[in-house]
Amino acid sequence: MKILEINAMRGPNYWSVNRHKLIVMVLDLEHLEEKPTNKIEGFLERLSEMFPTMVEHRCSIGTRGGFFQRVQEGTWMGHVVEHIALEIQTLAGMNCGFGRTRSYGQHGVYNVVFDYMEEKVGRFAAKASVRIAEALINGESYDLASDIQEMRELRESERLGPSTGSIIAEAESRGIPWIRLNKYSLCQLGYGANQKRIQATVTSQTSSIGVEIACDKEDTKFLLEQAEVPIPKGEIVRTEEGLKDAVRYVGYPLVVKPINGNHGRGITTNINSWEDALEAFEQAKKVSKSVIIEKFITGEDYRLLVINYKLVAAAKRTAAHVVGDGKSTIQQLVDVVNQDPKRGYGHEQVLTRIDIDALSLGILEEKGYTVDTVLADGEFCKLKDTANLSTGGTAEDVLDHVHPYNIFMAERIAKIIDLDICGIDIMTSDIGLPLTETGGAVLEVNAGPGFRMHLAPTGGLPRNVAAHVVDMMYPPGSTSRIPIVAVTGTNGKTTTTRLIAHMVRMKGFKVGYTTTDGVYIQNRLLMKGDCTGPSSAEFVLKDPTVDFAVLECARGGLLRAGLGFKKCDIGIVTNVAADHLGLKGIHTIEQLAKVKGVIPETVMPGGYAILNADDELVYDMNKNLKCNVAYFSMDENNPRIQQHMRRGGLSAIYEDGYITIAKGEWKIRVIKAVNVPLTFGGKAAFMIQNVLPAVLTGYIQGFAIEDIRVALETFIPSPGQTPGRLNMFEFRNFQVMLDYAHNPAGFRALQKMVEKMDGHPKIGIIAGVGDRRDEDTIELGSIAAEMFDEIIIRQDKNLRGRTEEELIGLIESGVKSIDPMKKVTVIPSEKEAITYAVRNATAGTLIVVSSDVVPDALNLVMSFKEEESKRLYEISNEDIPNLS
């Protein structure tokens, strides 16, 4: 078997609108296409022996053991690989259960689709599943345990921590979108101007001064002491001499900790000798230059969590430990504890496995113990200095037992340090009594405290502390979203996108929009190139200045990674026509329609899908939509439109020369099409079709008809507003029109306009595109033969796997099928082809340039226009008599 391609979906996609995290592996079975599983001797036995838990895979049979039944009856290896990929992820602690294996459209090649939790793990599982399948086929041994462990490690390195993850989960439950901004824990909640950020449990609202104070234990101690908060007696030292003075001042037992450490790093407790104090000092110095020497306070370790200056959780923490049974060694007791299903590797479970490390061995050595020591029955043996869950500790929820004075004190401390989210560590004998009575003390105030102990305590009630964070960031009445209009279709989507962005900008919004030309933020081009994929959409949605997004969404990005957003307010589909068929497993126009249909399926329930009622494939996308639907049509008598109007639906139609909104059967005439510059006096019917969904968008957004009309009147087809879309250049004796039309449907629409235009001869500069079917390229040639008097065949910059001669030959065959005598000139270079046409243009000529690299062609034509203007200026100056 051969893996041809692996793609990771991260948003709504062709395979599932609701399951966003999917791996799509293109797998060539090669000779195994002729060898289903029932033809491979012993395969089922080896598979079930390696994966006994796969008996739970029901598959299409729908019953336990269903997949094994399919294997026994005979299924193809792509299907087996799908199930192996799901099972090994589950064995690594990531429950995955969705999968599909479908033909890619080529003999023996399949799309193997399965879900994942962490992308790197999913990609690893794809490759590993093929290796495992091949080992099973050949009857070879395979180290499955090694793969499982590697996937666990990959997950721990990639996943969000439990604290960040809990906030994201809470945000998702409220419909708040989010974007991960780096490979660590920096995440964005919300979009555009309404975004907030979190990094672990520090938010974009958290005071930076508060964080600085909390990270400087010297400043923290000083402020708390000044505020009469009970803290342990202590000193800050930097040298061994300072340590001696501090030990004399504080007295044993001691705690030694770095001034800016966290997660228990570098902390040593209950020190009772100079030797231990010196060793602890050296350990702390590895973490920070300054070290705190404090009195060791006896009692229980508590963590109080304050969010938005209110106490929301409290936990009693216990360091990693074992309890003797009179017969087992310490190592054996640890092994038993680690068998608890609640404990796992890293953060995969609510508790972490206990590891016997150098610190643990040191603690045991102080007691005269080793890992082979047998503890007495009931003997408590601590294995870590600190009670952190990340080192194997446990936590018990005690929020309901915290004394009111201690609540008051915790909330006051949060204000003193100025932290909206803080963890306060307290040592006291009883949290149910005031700290002033028990002789307890506040040990630390932590910025970015972990939530894990409160989300899933070992005992007591779990507390949804993440909800308090989201409440603080997005209080009732606030919004996390910005309006999103998504535009897709085969032709017209870029112009529609630009027109909507223009309309919205005129209403005062700060618009970000994506097109095949680039990404624009507030009408400034910030990224050049085809920017219609998910990364470009995220670029706009991450911009904090943007309060309205208009996103062009093309098939390539959808198939490569899915959409860059999960929900939109308005989803527009302009049309579906044959284009790029045969690529990425999309071979039919119906499959292409399914790709485009992802957009309307992502519209929020209160939003609108705007569909072309003149296109049957687009119209049929209304099925199973969970949003409002509006239609547009070039024919007011379209039966679909008539039926929709009778039902009181919203539509936009072209009727009696007007661009009109129909609300039910009531018509609101917006403007005459001839008065819309984009339509070239009504000659460009396909541009009228682009205007209709844009007008609907404005109306749905609540824009006044007058404002919509002004937007249409001021949107001028030009290199600035519509680069490469019907850009007309008037030279002295001839005209040049540049357009992006690049597929048969686009050419047909352009043909209708060119037929209405004056000009003779009409010269077309066209090219074949490498990633189209042969029949599509031939059809371009035949349409060009009908449209133009003369044809110049140039070639695209990117041949996309074809040869120049092959593409030119296909175009020529299309031309000759219509008119064998048509004048055809082959000039492969686009620059040279345009130059040739301009230099040889006769009076009245209309040159139509179909360009794939719009900026280059525009710059060249504009340079010719500037050259002519300069020449005419010089001639006019020569004609003026010298009067001096």
Image: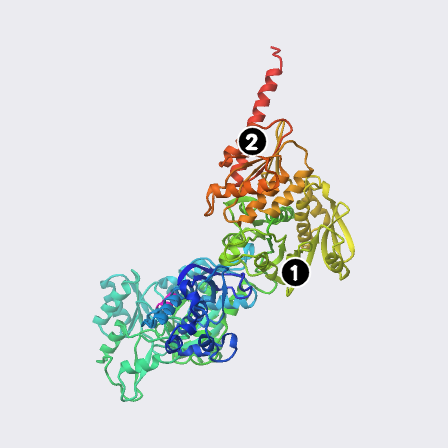
For residue 6, above or below residue 688: below
User: What is the magenta segment's predominant secondary structure?
Assistant: helix
| Residue that carries the numbered disc 1 in the rendered image | 620
Left or right, 527 with reference to 625: left
Q: Is residue 450 visible?
A: no
Magenta stretch: includes residue 96: no
| Residue that carries the numbered disc 2 in the rendered image | 837
Precedes in sequence: disc 2 or disc 1: 1
Left or right, 28 with reference to 381: right
Q: Residue 132 location in percent, x, y?
A: 37, 69
For residue 265, above or below residue 66: above
Task: Say what amino acid the circle numbered 2 marks.
Answer: Ala
Task: Say what amino acid the circle numbered 1 marks.
Answer: Asp
Q: Which quadrant would residue 837 be assigned to in this image? A: top right
Q: Residue 199 location in percent, x, y?
A: 44, 61
- Image: magenta residue range: 150-154
On-image quarter of the N terminus: bottom left
On-image quarter of the C terminus: top right
Left or right, 873 with reference to 691: left
Q: Is residue 288 visible?
A: yes
Q: What secondary structure is found at the residue carrying circle 2?
A: helix
